[in-house]
Every structure is written in C-alpha cells, then in structure tokens.
Image (tube, rainbow, N blue to C red):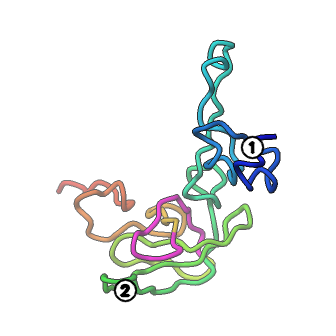
C-alpha cells in the first residue's frame, strides 16, 4: 500500500482516516468528524451534533438544587484582586458536595442551614462554580438593599 511508504503513521494507526484535510486532526480525536460530506448531505444525513458541556455539572441539569451548608469559609481571590470573599461548602440533595459563593454584603448562613444553589462561577475564586440564592431557604436577603433587589432576595420597600 502506497500510504505506508509515505507515512510511518499508517503502520501505527492502520484504521485512521486519511482524507487530505482532516487526517491530522482526526488521528487522535475521539469525536465524530465535524461536518458531513457532500454525498452525505445529498443522502439526507445530518451532521453529528456536539453535546454542550455544562458549566455546573453538580446540578445535573436543574436550575437550582437544595442543599445543607457543611462549612462557612472566607476565601482570598487570585491575583491581582485582594478581598475576603464569603463562600461555603454545601452538600446537595443529589449527594454532591460543592463550593458556593454567598453574594451580597453580610449573610446569616451557618452550618446545617438549608440553602438553594444555582450555577454561576466566581471569576477570581478558583473552584467556586456555584452561587447561593439569597432570600430562599434559611439564607436571608441582603439588608438595606435598594437596587437590584431581585438578585439579592429583598422585598419591595413599603411606602410610609
């Protein structure tokens, strides 16, 4: 076979596809080819769809999950930021244990509190891919919050 003379890779990978464009990229790839050929399109074959990789796998496709606080902690962000970020470890109802950020100023979260966890990473805290939902479960809303109240679990202030 003429390919074995041209390429020593054929001896190592005898079943690899050798189309002129994609053989180098497909050689070590586990996924299907990126697009269909013209003949496949003519036959009506749809190109394979790539699965979307979730940013919050512990939620298992749910928008929020209930959990129990295991530990409340204060984390330091990575460079160049400097702060004291409030976070906690939470055991979710599906058994996963995750680190979650507590948004807003001040909180009443403590060990054994029932909280709700949503997705959303914190850019300067490595490994923190989840947020707690303020105003739900045992976690109170932010006190004296006027703007963006819906994000922090604050009711509409009463007019006097």
Quarter of the image for residue 145 reads: bottom left
What's the magenta bit mostly, secondary-structure-wise? Answer: loop
SS category of the residue bearing label 1: helix
In front of the other: 126 or 69: 126
Image height of 11 relative to 137, above or below: above
Name the outermost residue toward the left: 160
- Label 1 CA crowd tier, 10 Å (few <14, some 14–19, many 20+): few
Tell me residue 136's x, y (percent). 50, 61
Quarter of the image for residue 45 reads: top right
Tell me residue 113's x, y (percent). 59, 75
Q: Residue at image x 33%, y 75%?
A: 105
What range of the chain is rendered magenta? 113-128
Q: Is residue 115 left or right of residue 144?
A: right
Image quarter of the C terminus: bottom left
Question: Which residue has dot 2 on it?
Answer: 84
Which callout, 2 or 1, points to the residue nearer the camera? Answer: 1
The image's mark for residue 3 is 1
Q: Earlier in the sequence, mark 2 or mark 1?
A: 1
Quarter of the image for residue 31 reads: top right
As for residue 36 lying within the magenta part, the answer is no
- Label 2 CA crowd tier, 10 Å (few <14, some 14–19, many 20+): few
């Amino acid at each position: 076979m003429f390919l074995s003379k041209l390429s020593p890779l054929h001896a190592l990978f005898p079943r690899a596809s050798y189309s002129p464009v994609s053989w180098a990229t497909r050689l070590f790839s586990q996924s299907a080819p990126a697009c269909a050929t013209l003949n496949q399109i003519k036959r009506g074959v749809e190109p394979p769809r790539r699965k979307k990789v979730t940013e919050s796998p512990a939620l298992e496709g749910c928008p929020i999950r209930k959990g129990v606080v295991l530990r409340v902690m204060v984390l330091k962000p990575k460079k160049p930021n400097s702060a004291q970020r409030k976070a906690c470890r939470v055991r979710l109802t599906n058994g996963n244990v995750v680190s979650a950020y507590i948004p807003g100023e001040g909180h009443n979260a403590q060990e054994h509190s029932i909280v709700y966890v949503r997705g959303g990473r914190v850019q300067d805290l490595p490994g923190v891919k989840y947020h707690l939902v303020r105003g739900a479960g045992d976690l109170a809303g932010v006190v004296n919050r006027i703007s963006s109240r819906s994000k922090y679990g604050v009711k509409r202030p009463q007019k006097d």
